Image (spheres, grey):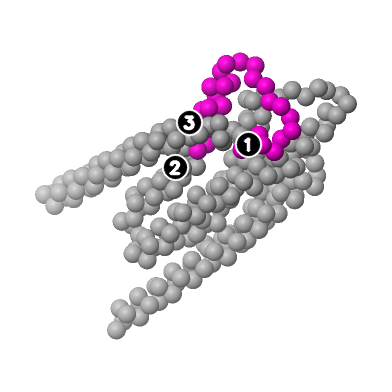
Amino acid sequence: MRLAWKSKHDNEMNLVGHLTELRNRLIVTFVLFILFFAIGFIFVQDIYSFFINDIETDLTVISPTEIVWIYFRMAGLVAFAGIIPVLAYEVWAFVKPALTPHEQKLSLSYIPFLFLLFIGGLIFGYVVFVKQIFPFILSLSEGMFDVMLTVDQYFKFLFRITVPFAFLFELPIVAMFLTTIGILTPDYMKKIRKYAYFVLIVICTMLTPPDFIMPIILALPLILLYEISIHLSKLVEGKKLKQHEEFMRSESL
Protein backbone atom coordinates (compact mmCIF):
# COMPACT_ATOMS: atom_id res chain seq x y z
CA MET A 1 0.00 0.00 0.00
CA ARG A 2 2.78 2.40 0.98
CA LEU A 3 4.71 1.62 -2.23
CA ALA A 4 1.62 2.19 -4.34
CA TRP A 5 0.95 5.52 -2.62
CA LYS A 6 4.58 6.57 -3.07
CA SER A 7 4.49 5.67 -6.77
CA LYS A 8 1.30 7.65 -7.26
CA HIS A 9 2.77 10.60 -5.34
CA ASP A 10 5.94 10.53 -7.49
CA ASN A 11 3.86 10.48 -10.66
CA GLU A 12 1.86 13.48 -9.47
CA MET A 13 5.07 15.33 -8.60
CA ASN A 14 6.51 14.54 -12.05
CA LEU A 15 3.34 15.84 -13.71
CA VAL A 16 3.44 19.05 -11.67
CA GLY A 17 7.11 19.46 -12.50
CA HIS A 18 6.45 19.04 -16.23
CA LEU A 19 3.56 21.49 -16.16
CA THR A 20 5.67 24.02 -14.26
CA GLU A 21 8.49 23.62 -16.76
CA LEU A 22 6.05 24.04 -19.65
CA ARG A 23 4.62 27.20 -18.06
CA ASN A 24 8.09 28.68 -17.59
CA ARG A 25 9.03 27.98 -21.18
CA LEU A 26 5.81 29.56 -22.44
CA ILE A 27 6.54 32.65 -20.33
CA VAL A 28 10.06 32.93 -21.79
CA THR A 29 8.66 32.55 -25.31
CA PHE A 30 6.02 35.22 -24.70
CA VAL A 31 8.55 37.70 -23.27
CA LEU A 32 10.86 37.23 -26.26
CA PHE A 33 7.89 37.60 -28.62
CA ILE A 34 7.16 41.00 -27.07
CA LEU A 35 10.84 41.92 -27.45
CA PHE A 36 10.88 40.96 -31.15
CA PHE A 37 7.60 42.81 -31.59
CA ALA A 38 9.15 45.97 -30.16
CA ILE A 39 12.14 45.63 -32.49
CA GLY A 40 9.80 45.20 -35.44
CA PHE A 41 7.82 48.24 -34.34
CA ILE A 42 11.00 50.34 -34.48
CA PHE A 43 11.78 49.27 -38.06
CA VAL A 44 8.24 49.35 -39.45
CA GLN A 45 9.03 52.03 -42.04
CA ASP A 46 11.96 50.05 -43.45
CA ILE A 47 9.91 46.85 -43.62
CA TYR A 48 7.00 48.69 -45.21
CA SER A 49 9.30 50.20 -47.84
CA PHE A 50 10.64 46.76 -48.70
CA PHE A 51 7.17 45.33 -49.30
CA ILE A 52 5.96 48.18 -51.55
CA ASN A 53 9.25 48.76 -53.37
CA ASP A 54 8.38 46.50 -56.33
CA ILE A 55 4.82 47.61 -56.97
CA GLU A 56 3.84 50.52 -59.19
CA THR A 57 0.41 51.13 -57.68
CA ASP A 58 0.03 53.81 -55.03
CA LEU A 59 -1.54 52.72 -51.76
CA THR A 60 -3.97 54.88 -49.85
CA VAL A 61 -5.16 55.10 -46.28
CA ILE A 62 -8.84 55.74 -45.61
CA SER A 63 -8.85 55.65 -41.81
CA PRO A 64 -6.41 56.27 -38.95
CA THR A 65 -6.84 52.69 -37.77
CA GLU A 66 -5.20 51.43 -40.96
CA ILE A 67 -2.00 53.25 -40.00
CA VAL A 68 -2.07 51.64 -36.57
CA TRP A 69 -2.79 48.19 -37.96
CA ILE A 70 0.03 48.36 -40.49
CA TYR A 71 2.44 48.96 -37.61
CA PHE A 72 1.03 45.99 -35.77
CA ARG A 73 1.14 43.75 -38.85
CA MET A 74 4.74 44.62 -39.70
CA ALA A 75 5.89 44.26 -36.10
CA GLY A 76 3.91 41.04 -35.72
CA LEU A 77 5.58 39.53 -38.78
CA VAL A 78 9.03 40.31 -37.36
CA ALA A 79 8.04 38.92 -33.96
CA PHE A 80 6.64 35.74 -35.46
CA ALA A 81 9.71 35.12 -37.62
CA GLY A 82 12.04 35.85 -34.71
CA ILE A 83 10.20 33.63 -32.26
CA ILE A 84 10.31 30.51 -34.48
CA PRO A 85 13.83 29.40 -33.45
CA VAL A 86 13.08 30.32 -29.83
CA LEU A 87 9.86 28.33 -29.80
CA ALA A 88 11.60 25.42 -31.53
CA TYR A 89 14.35 25.45 -28.90
CA GLU A 90 11.83 25.51 -26.06
CA VAL A 91 10.00 22.53 -27.58
CA TRP A 92 13.32 20.74 -28.02
CA ALA A 93 14.35 21.46 -24.43
CA PHE A 94 10.98 20.19 -23.17
CA VAL A 95 11.23 16.84 -25.01
CA LYS A 96 15.00 16.57 -24.55
CA PRO A 97 14.84 14.13 -21.58
CA ALA A 98 12.97 11.63 -23.75
CA LEU A 99 15.63 11.68 -26.49
CA THR A 100 18.94 9.86 -26.70
CA PRO A 101 22.13 11.98 -26.73
CA HIS A 102 22.43 11.44 -30.48
CA GLU A 103 18.80 12.47 -31.06
CA GLN A 104 19.28 15.52 -28.86
CA LYS A 105 22.30 16.71 -30.81
CA LEU A 106 20.74 15.95 -34.17
CA SER A 107 17.39 17.59 -33.51
CA LEU A 108 19.04 20.67 -31.98
CA SER A 109 20.90 21.26 -35.25
CA TYR A 110 17.58 21.63 -37.08
CA ILE A 111 16.58 24.83 -35.28
CA PRO A 112 18.57 27.41 -37.30
CA PHE A 113 17.22 25.93 -40.53
CA LEU A 114 13.64 26.44 -39.33
CA PHE A 115 14.25 30.17 -39.31
CA LEU A 116 16.12 30.19 -42.63
CA LEU A 117 13.44 28.14 -44.41
CA PHE A 118 10.68 30.34 -42.98
CA ILE A 119 12.41 33.43 -44.37
CA GLY A 120 13.01 31.59 -47.65
CA GLY A 121 9.31 30.76 -47.86
CA LEU A 122 8.38 34.39 -47.22
CA ILE A 123 10.73 35.54 -49.97
CA PHE A 124 9.41 32.91 -52.38
CA GLY A 125 5.81 33.87 -51.64
CA TYR A 126 6.63 37.57 -52.02
CA VAL A 127 8.35 37.06 -55.38
CA VAL A 128 5.43 34.98 -56.62
CA PHE A 129 3.01 37.65 -55.41
CA VAL A 130 4.86 40.60 -56.96
CA LYS A 131 5.87 38.92 -60.24
CA GLN A 132 2.82 36.75 -60.95
CA ILE A 133 -0.28 37.16 -58.81
CA PHE A 134 -0.48 40.92 -58.27
CA PRO A 135 0.16 41.87 -61.94
CA PHE A 136 -2.39 39.28 -63.05
CA ILE A 137 -5.05 40.72 -60.75
CA LEU A 138 -4.34 44.28 -61.89
CA SER A 139 -4.45 43.24 -65.55
CA LEU A 140 -8.08 42.18 -65.12
CA SER A 141 -9.08 45.78 -64.41
CA GLU A 142 -7.48 47.38 -67.49
CA GLY A 143 -9.99 49.59 -69.30
CA MET A 144 -12.70 48.80 -66.77
CA PHE A 145 -11.79 50.28 -63.39
CA ASP A 146 -9.65 52.91 -61.75
CA VAL A 147 -7.56 50.91 -59.30
CA MET A 148 -7.32 52.28 -55.78
CA LEU A 149 -5.87 49.97 -53.16
CA THR A 150 -5.75 50.70 -49.47
CA VAL A 151 -2.79 49.73 -47.33
CA ASP A 152 -4.98 47.39 -45.30
CA GLN A 153 -6.32 45.56 -48.37
CA TYR A 154 -2.91 45.20 -49.98
CA PHE A 155 -1.16 43.73 -46.95
CA LYS A 156 -4.03 41.42 -46.10
CA PHE A 157 -3.78 39.99 -49.60
CA LEU A 158 0.04 39.91 -49.48
CA PHE A 159 0.23 38.04 -46.18
CA ARG A 160 -2.46 35.62 -47.28
CA ILE A 161 -0.05 34.54 -50.05
CA THR A 162 3.35 34.76 -48.39
CA VAL A 163 2.74 33.34 -44.90
CA PRO A 164 1.39 29.93 -46.07
CA PHE A 165 4.44 29.52 -48.31
CA ALA A 166 6.66 30.30 -45.33
CA PHE A 167 5.05 27.48 -43.34
CA LEU A 168 5.17 25.04 -46.25
CA PHE A 169 8.90 25.64 -46.62
CA GLU A 170 9.36 24.23 -43.11
CA LEU A 171 8.36 20.77 -44.35
CA PRO A 172 11.91 19.29 -44.70
CA ILE A 173 12.93 20.21 -41.16
CA VAL A 174 9.62 19.06 -39.68
CA ALA A 175 9.97 15.74 -41.49
CA MET A 176 13.53 15.30 -40.19
CA PHE A 177 12.51 16.10 -36.61
CA LEU A 178 9.51 13.75 -36.65
CA THR A 179 11.70 11.01 -38.12
CA THR A 180 14.31 11.62 -35.43
CA ILE A 181 11.79 11.09 -32.63
CA GLY A 182 10.22 8.10 -34.38
CA ILE A 183 6.84 9.55 -35.36
CA LEU A 184 7.40 9.65 -39.13
CA THR A 185 9.15 7.34 -41.59
CA PRO A 186 10.23 7.88 -45.21
CA ASP A 187 8.21 4.82 -46.23
CA TYR A 188 5.04 6.44 -44.90
CA MET A 189 5.84 9.67 -46.74
CA LYS A 190 6.25 7.69 -49.95
CA LYS A 191 2.97 5.89 -49.28
CA ILE A 192 1.02 9.15 -49.02
CA ARG A 193 3.00 10.92 -51.75
CA LYS A 194 0.13 11.24 -54.23
CA TYR A 195 -2.18 12.62 -51.53
CA ALA A 196 0.50 15.10 -50.46
CA TYR A 197 0.90 16.27 -54.06
CA PHE A 198 -2.85 16.75 -54.34
CA VAL A 199 -2.98 18.77 -51.11
CA LEU A 200 -0.10 20.99 -52.24
CA ILE A 201 -1.81 21.69 -55.57
CA VAL A 202 -5.09 22.47 -53.79
CA ILE A 203 -3.29 24.89 -51.45
CA CYS A 204 -1.64 26.63 -54.41
CA THR A 205 -5.03 26.80 -56.15
CA MET A 206 -6.50 28.54 -53.11
CA LEU A 207 -3.61 31.03 -52.93
CA THR A 208 -3.33 31.95 -56.62
CA PRO A 209 -5.67 33.56 -59.18
CA PRO A 210 -8.19 31.38 -61.05
CA ASP A 211 -5.79 29.99 -63.61
CA PHE A 212 -5.16 26.35 -64.54
CA ILE A 213 -1.40 26.53 -65.10
CA MET A 214 -0.22 28.83 -62.30
CA PRO A 215 -1.18 26.58 -59.32
CA ILE A 216 0.67 23.65 -60.91
CA ILE A 217 3.74 25.80 -61.60
CA LEU A 218 3.78 27.08 -58.03
CA ALA A 219 3.21 23.59 -56.66
CA LEU A 220 6.34 22.26 -58.39
CA PRO A 221 8.81 23.83 -55.88
CA LEU A 222 6.66 22.54 -53.03
CA ILE A 223 6.55 19.05 -54.55
CA LEU A 224 10.34 19.24 -54.86
CA LEU A 225 10.48 20.18 -51.17
CA TYR A 226 8.36 17.14 -50.35
CA GLU A 227 10.73 14.87 -52.26
CA ILE A 228 13.69 16.47 -50.48
CA SER A 229 11.88 15.84 -47.20
CA ILE A 230 11.56 12.15 -48.06
CA HIS A 231 15.26 11.96 -48.86
CA LEU A 232 16.25 13.77 -45.64
CA SER A 233 13.90 11.58 -43.63
CA LYS A 234 15.58 8.52 -45.17
CA LEU A 235 19.01 9.84 -44.18
CA VAL A 236 17.89 10.43 -40.61
CA GLU A 237 16.34 6.96 -40.39
CA GLY A 238 19.55 5.44 -41.78
CA LYS A 239 21.64 7.18 -39.15
CA LYS A 240 19.26 6.00 -36.43
CA LEU A 241 19.47 2.39 -37.62
CA LYS A 242 23.25 2.56 -37.83
CA GLN A 243 23.48 3.97 -34.32
CA HIS A 244 21.14 1.25 -33.03
CA GLU A 245 23.25 -1.46 -34.65
CA GLU A 246 26.43 -0.04 -33.11
CA PHE A 247 24.76 0.10 -29.72
CA MET A 248 23.56 -3.51 -29.95
CA ARG A 249 27.02 -4.59 -31.08
CA SER A 250 28.67 -2.86 -28.12
CA GLU A 251 26.14 -4.41 -25.74
CA SER A 252 26.85 -7.89 -27.05
CA LEU A 253 30.56 -7.39 -26.39
- Residue, x 61% and y 57% (percent of image)? 226
Residue 250 screen position, x and y as percent: 32, 80
In three-dimensional space, the C-alpha distance between marks 3 and 2, rounded to whole angstroms, equals: 15 Å
In-front residue for pair 236/66: 66
Residue 184 screen position, x and y as percent: 50, 58
- Residue, x 61% and y 34% (percent of image)? 49
Please tell me whether residue 239 is drawn above or below residue 140 in the rendered image. Answer: below
In three-dimensional space, the C-alpha distance between marks 1 and 3, rounded to whole angstroms, equals: 15 Å
- Residue, x 43% and y 32% (percent of image)? 38
Q: In the image, which is nearer the foreground, mark 1 or mark 2?
A: 1
Label 2 near label 1: C-beta < 8 Å? no
Please tell me whether residue 233 is drawn above or below residue 139 in the rendered image. Answer: below
Residue 166 placement: quadrant: top right
Q: In this view, does 245 lie to the left or right of 196?
A: left
- The residue that label 2 is drawn on is 83
- The residue that label 3 is drawn on is 41
**Mark 1: amino acid:** Phe
**Mark 3: amino acid:** Phe
Residue 21 screen position, x and y as percent: 28, 43
**Mark 2: amino acid:** Ile
Q: Is residue 243 left or right of residue 10?
A: right
In-front residue for pair 143/21: 143
Label 2 near label 3: C-beta < 8 Å? no
- Label located before the other in sequence (1 or 2): 1
Magenta residues? 50-78
The chief SS type of the magenta part is helix
In three-dimensional space, the C-alpha distance between marks 1 and 2, rounded to whole angstroms, equals: 21 Å
Inspect the magenta stretch and tell me whether residue 209 lies in it: no
Residue 230 placement: quadrant: bottom right
Q: How crowded is mark 1: few (under 14 residues within 10 Å), some or many (20 or more)?
A: some
